[in-house]
Image (tube, rainbow, N blue to C red):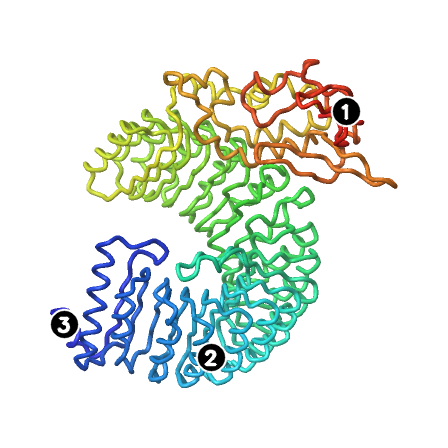
Amino acid sequence: ELIAGFLQKFKSLCVVVQCKDGKNDPMPFEKKVAGLYLRSLARASAAGWRGLHGLMIGLSSKEEHVQELYKALEHASDIKVLDVKAGIGRGRDFGAKMSKLIKDWRSITDLSLSHNRIEDSARVELFKHLTACISLEKLDLGYTCLLPQGAKALAEILTQLPVLKVLDIRGNKLKDEGATALGSSLQACVQLESLNICCNCIDDAGFRSLGSSLEHNTALTFLHFGGEQVEDSVSNPSFFEQAENSIGSEGAEAMGQALRKMTKLQSFNMQTCWLSPTTAWDPILMALQNCQHLRFLNLGRNYPRFTAENMRLLAETLPQCRALTHLILQGMVATEDTPGNLLPEALVQCPNLRTLDLHGNEMGVFPGVIEGFLAQASRLTNLDALHLGENMLGNGSVKKLCRVLPDMTSLRQLELSHNGIRSSGALELFKLLPRLTQICDLNLEENSVGNMAIEELANLVPRNTTLTSLNLCSNPISDSGATHLASALEHTLSLKILLVDECRIKSAGMEVLMASKEKVDTHIDIIDDPAYPPDDDTEDERRENEMDPVSIFNAAMGGALQQMPQFMQETLPHFLQANMPMMPNEMLDEEDEDDEGGEDASDGEQGPWMPFLPPMFGQMAGVNAAANPPEGGGAAGHLVMGPMGAFLMPPMAGMPPMGVGLPMTMNFDNMGHPDHSGSGSEDSRGSDSEEHSDGSQSGEDSETGMGNI
């Protein structure tokens, strides 16, 4: 009653009722508070108050909340902004209720019903009433289960929304049928400035239709038709899943023609569009050269990656986009044939570039690519954020990066997660902190930064007055490292967020950290959920930082490297240098299994290397459990076996011929335990007549037709 009386004193008010971010379930007290506000709004509305001009609500569905919402909106005929996303409409009658309300909203300019299921029976009626909203400028129907039928119904009314500027219909599985229906209507929306059609299962035919229609939408400044993974929706979780768009040659040509005419375009996002063949990139990249006002460009995670020809065209395109501030090329730019200097030299010619995201490019595997980038990095003096996670940099590349970081005088955010950085490499980075007076956010998540480096970090952090966020998650930091961090917290002037979850910090270390947090005036968030087994951090860590990765592999695999083909002996060490730092301690010494009173070290998480490393070994070694060649010739495949399962792959250049077994058995399920890995002895070698426990033969003439392992 008090709040309702207070609200009635306002002639025009926008109310925000927000519980967390809409994806997480609110706490019980948050639900109570949200219900209180909604009841207050409903009571003020019932008392004749007409001052509610905006309502933004984001909380999980609760029946009494929904009913109070309807009551609050019942008399809100002058409302201009309504955003009821995040699952308010989980009930079956949401569309019908909203349809009755919307018909009286002549002044509404911004309507967002995203993440709410609009039932089929109410959709046509709802869209029909939308035509009365002649002032509507923004319409967000993302994740509302439109499907092709809904797209057709929407297409029928788009021409009657004369001032529509923003249309968001992402995540609705429109498919080609729905995209084609929308295409002819979109060209009538001459004032349209923003269009989001990502995650709709649209293929080449749909993009051909959209491209020919969008040629008329020359006012577009924001265009997003990527297909990254659809968000889970609380309204209908089973509906939402992978729904990428995919573009072929004809669709790309049509979209390229449309892009050429979008000279006002400022933001373009086509992440994960599965563009194929690679020549389909040509019309897209050439068209972007006309976008002189482009500020945001996301071409990341499209597979296959850019070829050398694609990279040359991209290098020609980027300097033409003089206004570019954000560039995202995740998982696109590094291949064996990529000239290392192309991209860096093009980036230097983008004077306004502030954010560069090269996450997931595995540049460390391709020496020419990483060397080319580092050679030009010092010239990127305007760069504000640099994302280099999942690039297999290792210690060597990180140390080279440290030489150029002082020259990047504007850099505030540096992301180096998942790079196999060990303590010695991290030490070089930490020693720079007093000189990096502009750095605010440093991310070293999921590396192998141990207590030795953390001790030095604790001494250096207080000398940096700008670092506000430090992410050390999933690193082998134990209680002794936590003690050093606690000491640093008590003397830091700027650090606000410290992330150490999934480290090896036990309760004693966390108590020390929390005690230090209480002593400082600034607010520090310390998050931890220990997932690693206890460790003895002195001798083990010293050995971990000193041992050569190739020696570790040989020790664990019984001298396997020397018994492999020559091409393997040349290739594998480069791979090990980039990836062995990510392996857990049990790879180093079989005695680690008995750490801490006999607790089995292998019972915990295997570490980030497990999903990737064994299949990679399998691809390089072939493992050579091969099927017999098909009749009439043709190449047979290799059976690649690992802890995640087994799969057949086609022959690779340099692989042993079919039916010729490697001179050892490699059991990747027991990797890291030398007594189980096979030593290359006669007992572990494949034989044409060796009999297994089930009576089967491992030779070429076995019933399964499999070759030697």
> Residue at the location (62% across, 30% down)?
574
Secondary structure beneath label 3: helix
Q: Secondary structure at mark 1?
A: loop
Tell me residue 341's x, y (percent): 63, 46
Q: Please, what is the three-letter code of the amino acid marked with disc 2?
A: Val
The crowd level at tag 3 (other Cα within 10 Å; few <14, some 14-19, many 20+) is: few
Q: Position of residue 493 (x, y in %)?
A: 26, 40
What percent of the width, then of the height, locates residue 51? 22, 79
Type of residue at label 3? Phe
Please give the label number shown on residue 6: 3
In the displayed structure, 543 sits above or below 130; it is above
Whole-angstrom CA distance, mark 2 to mark 3, is: 39 Å
Please name whichever residue, 107 or 567, is drawn nearer the observer in this view of the structure: 107
Q: Which residue is mark 2?
A: 124
Residue 634 located left or right of residue 301 = right
Label 2's element? helix
Q: Measure the C-alpha gap from mark 1 to mark 2.
A: 67 Å
Residue type of the residue flagged with mark 1: Gly
Task: Name, please, the residue furthest toward the right.
Answer: 632
For marks 3 and 1, give the one nearer the viewer: 1
Residue 683 or residue 161, whichever sits in front? 683
Q: Residue furthest top?
A: 682
Discs 3, 1 touching: Cβ within 8 Å: no
Counting from the top left corner in percent of width and height, residue 186 is at 55, 78
- Image check: 70 left or right of 10? right
* Disc 2 versus disc 3: nearer the observer: 2
- The image quarter containing residue 263 is bottom right
Q: Which residue is mark 1?
A: 699
